[in-house]
Amino acid sequence: MTTNLLIAALNTTTSRPPDDTPTPLWIGYLSVIIAVLFFGTNLVPAGKYPIGDGLSFQFFMCCGIWVTGLVIDLFVKSPQFYPLVLIGGILWTTGNILSLLVIRINGLGMSMLLWCTTNMLIGWASGHFGWFGLIPEDVEKPYLNYIGVAIATISGAVFLAIRTIRPEEISVDIEERQPILQPSPPVVITTSNDALIETTTITTPASPPTKMYLRVIGCFLAILAGVLFGFIFIPSTYIQDHPYGQYQSASKNGLHYVFAMYSGIFFSSMFYFIIYIAYKGNRPYLHVPSIFPGILSGIMWGIAQAGFLVANSVLSQTISFPLITIGPGTIAIFWSIFYFKDISGQRNYLIIIGGTLLRIISAVLIVLSKPIPH
């Protein structure tokens, strides 16, 4: 059913609509639903496979993303390729690499709260206030939009209180599990599967000042990753907002910028992966059974991001960013409850109910603020 809905959205947005005939808003909201479902589910195929330090998994995921972009590009008949959009893909890959490091410093919960909240606020603000030369995007009822974004931010802090099942302590070869910047001697570590991503925490002793220093660095890098994630649509939106000069043939169809963005993701990921292989002395951590799940995760992410691009074009970032950034976390939590079964207990369920209600209220307020088409 979801595939049929996506095809309907693609068919409706294949051609650039005339300037006096804006794309129907329902296409934008359909794209939001597709993006939320696929962003919230894209890591499920890989959720039960070890990914080590994540660099190899990340590369194969980006391969799946690029293939998805190629298929979409062929479907929309290979529109003009704008090199500027490559920058958006490079920013995403850089933020994704940072997130792998941040998780190992501050854990998944705090890290995701910081970069998801920063991502939402940066993406929303850049569209709403017209940063970096973008045309400011207005809504009919700004106060509802502001309140909705504020509640969405609060809901992230609520979900942070969720506790997963206690991880088991195991000893493993450091060559299989060590993060890139960790020293080489074998150590005892703990592993956990929280919100569909395997995380690793080094349990070697560290002095309180060192721990505090690392936490500060981790928080800074998480915020930096969120800023990079929030900037990824600025190049494509800038081109859409300036249909004159070198961009006079620019399309309003978000799908026309998918291949350029995904190419930026693929080639920058290849660049980082080559550096990683060189650093590891041509011995990267590679768990063969996780390769296909990584590619599949990339395909699902690629579909979600395509929906995000369409939603930005139809609804504006002021509407789409808050809706799409708050939804996937809730979907992932339900996967954790019913499939991975690493979240249980009355306390957790009450937190999830409260956080979900806040996000529903936030989404309703944001939708009611009503976008004003360009």
Image (cartoon, helix red, strand yellow):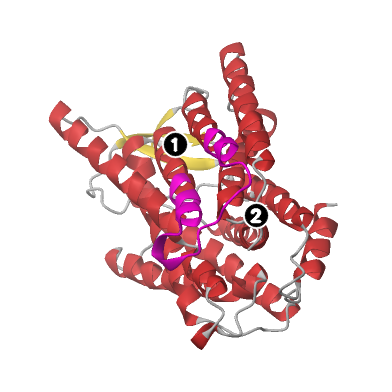
**Residue at x-position 71% and y-position 56%:** 28
User: Which residue does the image show at 61% across and 15% down from the upper left?
Assistant: 350
In the foreground, 35 or 183: 35
Q: Pointer 1: residues within 10 angstroms few (<14), some, or many (20+)?
A: many
Question: Which amino acid type is shown beneath numbered disc 2?
Answer: Ile
Q: Between marks 1 and 2, how big is the CA–CA gap?
A: 30 Å
Q: Which residues are magenta?
A: 121-148
Res 252 quadrant in image:
bottom right
Badge 2: few (under 14), some or many (20 or more) residues near its Cα, within 10 Å? few
Counting from the top left corner in percent of width and height, residue 308 is at: 62, 57
**Circle 1 SS class:** helix
- The residue closer to the viewer here, 220 or 340, is 220
**Marks 1 and 2 in Cβ contact (< 8 Å):** no
Q: Which mark is residue 178?
A: none
Q: Position of residue 114 (x, y in %)?
A: 40, 39
Look at mark 2 in the image and give the residue it sits on. 372
Q: Give the vertical position of 213 relative to 177 (above or below).
A: above
Q: Main SS type for the magenta part?
A: helix
Residue 211 image offset from top left, x and y in percent: 21, 32
Quadrant location of the C terminus? bottom right
The foreground one among 176 and 339 is 339
Q: Is residue 75 visible to us here?
A: yes
The spot of residue 370 in percent (x, y) is 67, 46
Which of pointers 1 and 2 indicates the residue nearer the eye?
2
- Determine which residue is flagged by label 1: 113
Relative to residue 353, is residue 322 depicted above or below?
Answer: below
> Within the magenta stretch, is there residue 284?
no
Q: Amino acid at mark 1?
A: Leu
Image quarter for residue 145? top right
Please say whether residue 173 is visible from this viewpoint: no
Q: Secondary structure at mark 2?
A: loop
Give the mark count.
Answer: 2
